[in-house]
Image (cartoon, grey):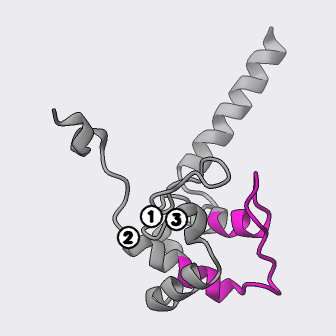
Amino acid sequence: MRKTSSLFSAALCAVALCAAGHGVARAQDAPPGDAAEGKRLYLATGCFTCHGRSGQGGALNGPAPIVAKTAMPFDGFTGQLRQPINEMPAYSEIVMSDKQIADIYAFLQTLAGPLPTKDMAIFKD
């Protein structure tokens, strides 16, 4: 029981440190990107086919997450592009540079984020 309690305490401390922002690059810490170039890349590389033209997600090959105004830290976003989960194609550094990723990330930050449920037309009846 003590061993389990110690492991739980250690895990809780690790989560608290991460939540405090140690070592996490938030959106405001992302490298500067060119949103106009990011839009061009987002469309040219086909991101829109799964995530939608306005980044609101889709279901072409399964549920694709909303990426508009993403809260994902820049480092996590880069990691997802480099070594994606599920069916998303990988974008190695040879295919897409870190600068291009920063441009796409900047573009996504300009998009309107997801609507709160209370603001969706279907729920206003």
Outermost residue, top side = 1
In the image, which residues are magenta? 77-104
Disc 2 on helix, strand or loop?
A: loop
Identify the residue under disc 1: 68
Quarter occupied by the N terminus? top right
Q: Quadrant of residue 84?
A: bottom right
Q: Quadrant of residue 100?
A: bottom right
Q: Is residue 124 left or right of residue 87?
A: left
Residue 121 is labelled as none
Indicate which label's residue lies in the foreground, 2 or 3: 2
Identify the residue under disc 3: 26
Quote the CA–CA distance across marks 2 and 3: 17 Å
Marks 3 and 1, the one that precedes in the sequence: 3
Quote the CA–CA distance across marks 2 and 1: 5 Å
Q: Position of residue 56 (x, y in %)?
A: 45, 59
Please give the name of the residue rendered at 68% of the width and 70% of the height, measured from the top-left corner.
78
Indicate which label's residue lies in the foreground, 3 or 1: 1
Query: Is residue 12 in view?
Result: yes
Evaluate if marks 3 and 1 touch, with contact meaning CB atoms under 8 Å apart: no
